[in-house]
Structure formats: structure tokens, C-alpha cells
Amino acid sequence: MKVVSLVGARPQFVKLAPIAHELARRGHEHTIIHTGQHYHPLLSQSFFDELQIPSPDMNLAAGSATPALQTGDMLARLDPVLAQTRPHWVLTYGDTTSTLAGTLAAAAQNLSIAHVEAGLRSFNRTMPEERNRVVADHLGDLLLAPTRAAMDNLAAEGLADRSVLCGDLMVDCLRAVMPSSGGASAELPCFLADSPDGYLLATVHRAATTDDPQRLSAVLAALAACPKPVWLLVHPRLAARCREFGIDPVGGSLRTADPLPYRTMVAALAAAAGLVTDSGGLQKEALVLGTPCSTLRAETEWPETLSDGWNVLVPDPRDLPAVVARTRPAGPPPSPFGDGHAAAAIVSQLANRGERPVLVSRPTRRSVTA
């Protein structure tokens, strides 16, 4: 079976790792195409090194741009590559611009598309991630859902016959770096030693947060007012916007650091008193690690994380200091994301349908059952 994986951003590399290992273990042909959407070494190459992902067979070097320009550039670069490789399956992951471009490029050539992490919905179409995941699901031929809620969303949109519940690849990857003792197999970065009474980790990168100077200033002021030290891991987009708007992201409780390699990030998140983020994937990781999360958004595509107050939505940044001071939920966190064997389930689904011709008419898809 020939599989092409299209990836380009940090969360996709985490999902790719267990898939790449499982495809290799079963002897399938796997081509990895890196779009170059994330090109900072700490958000790209470090994941390939740490998680032992094979080097990409090609890097499209798309770089940064507006979503429309980035999508167009990726489409132009992907078209001849997919025409040459002609895989049995094109795997797209999550909800990034790379996902949208990969889906459109594969559909244009009538290649069979499998969407990893299908069925997520924030029900906010102003988010580019929401638009990307909706397109990926409706053009996809095999929808690999991580949770029951995702399966329900797909069924509500008439996509049940193409949907399979496989679990979440994030759990596979976390298990690979977490020893049986439950701690992460990496030491904490030395700067966290300056917070003996506990600390909060924070990430801010979405356009809705960073591209509005008033919103960004309010978020940074709220982080500075938190009752514990806050270590903000500075994404390249955040750094660029702070320079552009003349905002200093330091003061009060707020400190800054570079993005952390994956294993170190897992260790830091597991040891943190809490997480503040506008990310999607980190909400899940925090829940699995038992770290309370406060999400700087009005909605989440991961409603499972809201159980028992493990994750609290904070649309108004002024509420953040009080929210992060809440009492830690009692008991262990829920486990809605599967048993850590999502990669095996996904590769089995692909293999069971893999050796077939590429699609010639998308309206006549075969039914997909678990």
C-alpha cells in the first residue's frame, strides 16, 4: 500500500509520528511531504529528531503568508508531486492550511483521501481551522474520528457512512514519551526552577488572539496579573506581532521562553499548576496529563476537555486571573481520547481499503464501517 502524509505544523508532526512508525512496522510504502508551514526548528525539525520520524521525502518550503496565498502556493507545489506519486491514500491531519491545501490537491486528482482527526467542530466559521476541517471532512473518503463527539458531529452532517472511530493519535505519542511511572521522560528546563511554588505555562498563537493589538494587549496584561509565575512560550507569530505593535510581552507574573521540544514540553506541562492557551491540541494534552487548562476562547473543538472544570473557556481575558486560581478538580481526569492504539486502528482501516484504484467519481464513495 502506498500512503502519502501531508504535514506542515507542530500538531501534525505529533500525529504523524505513530502513523509513520506503524506504517513502517507493517512494511507499507510511506511518502512524507512537509509543506514548510512551520519552519522554525523548535516547531519542526526537533519533532522529527525527537520522535524518530523519517525525514520528509520532500519539503515544499511554503513558508509564512496569508492563508489564501499560503494555500495557493501549496496547491501549485503539491499538484505535480501527487501526480507523480499516485498513492492509494493521501493522509491529511487536523485543521491547518496544509490540511486544506492537501485535501484540495488530492481531490483535484481524484485520489482517495483519509482525514485524521475528523469530526471536530467549534461551530465558529470565523476560525480558519473550522473552515479547513469542514472542507477536509466533506471532501474526504475515510474520516478517522478521535472521539464519540466527533462521530456524532459527522453523523449530523450526513457523513456517518465514511466515518470510523479510531481514537486520538496524541495519546499514542504521549504514551511513547511517558514511562510507566507516569512522569515525562525528560527533565524540566532549568528556567522553571525559578518557580518553586508552581508555575503556569502559556501559549498564544492564533490569529484571533495575536492579530488584534487590543486583544493581544489584554491577553498579555491578564497573564501578567495571574497569581503564579507565567511562562509564555513565544510562537514566531506572537513574536512578530509584539514587534509590530510595540508590545512588551514581559511584566508582572509574565516571563517568556522559546518554544520547547516535545518531550520537554510534555514534562513541563505535566509539572505545571495550569495551562493557559488558545491552542487546540494542548487542551487535550493537558487533560491527559491531569493539568488544569484555561482556554482563551469562547468555544472549543474539544468539548470533552470541559468535563468537571479541567478546562475552562475564558473569552474575556480580564477573567483569567480568577479562573487560573480555581481549585483543581477532584479525582482523575476523564479519558475520552482512546487507549493509545489509534495508529494501529488507522493503518488497519487504510490497509483494508488500500489496494484499490483511485476514485473516479466522488459522489459514489464506498461506505465505510468500523
Image: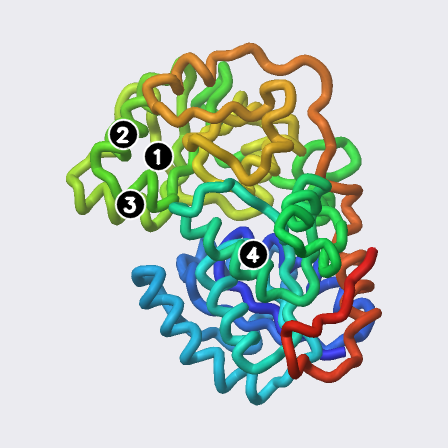
Disc 4 from disc 2: Cα separation = 30 Å
Q: Are the residues tagged 1 and 2 within 8 Å (C-beta)?
A: yes
Residue type for callout 2: Val
Name which of mark 4 and mark 2 comes first in the sequence.
4
- Mark 1, secondary structure of its residue: strand
Query: In this rendering, which labeled residue sits more in front, label 4 or label 1?
Result: 4
Name which of mark 3 and mark 2 comes first in the sequence.
3
- Mark 2, secondary structure of its residue: loop
- Residue at 66%, 37% (x, y): give it: 184
- Mark 3, secondary structure of its residue: helix
Q: Position of residue 145 (x, y in %)?
A: 69, 51
Q: Position of residue 314 (x, y in %)?
A: 43, 25
Task: Name the residue that disc number 4 marks.
Answer: 12
Residue type for callout 1: Thr
Query: In this rendering, which labeled residue sits more in front, label 4 or label 3?
Result: 4
Task: Name the residue that disc number 2 marks.
Answer: 250
Residue 230: quarter of image: top left
Disc 1 from disc 2: Cα separation = 7 Å
Disc 3 from disc 1: Cα separation = 10 Å
Task: Name the residue that disc number 1 marks.
Answer: 256
Residue type for callout 3: Ala
Vertical position of residue 159 compared to residue 167: above or below: below
Residue 360 is marked as none
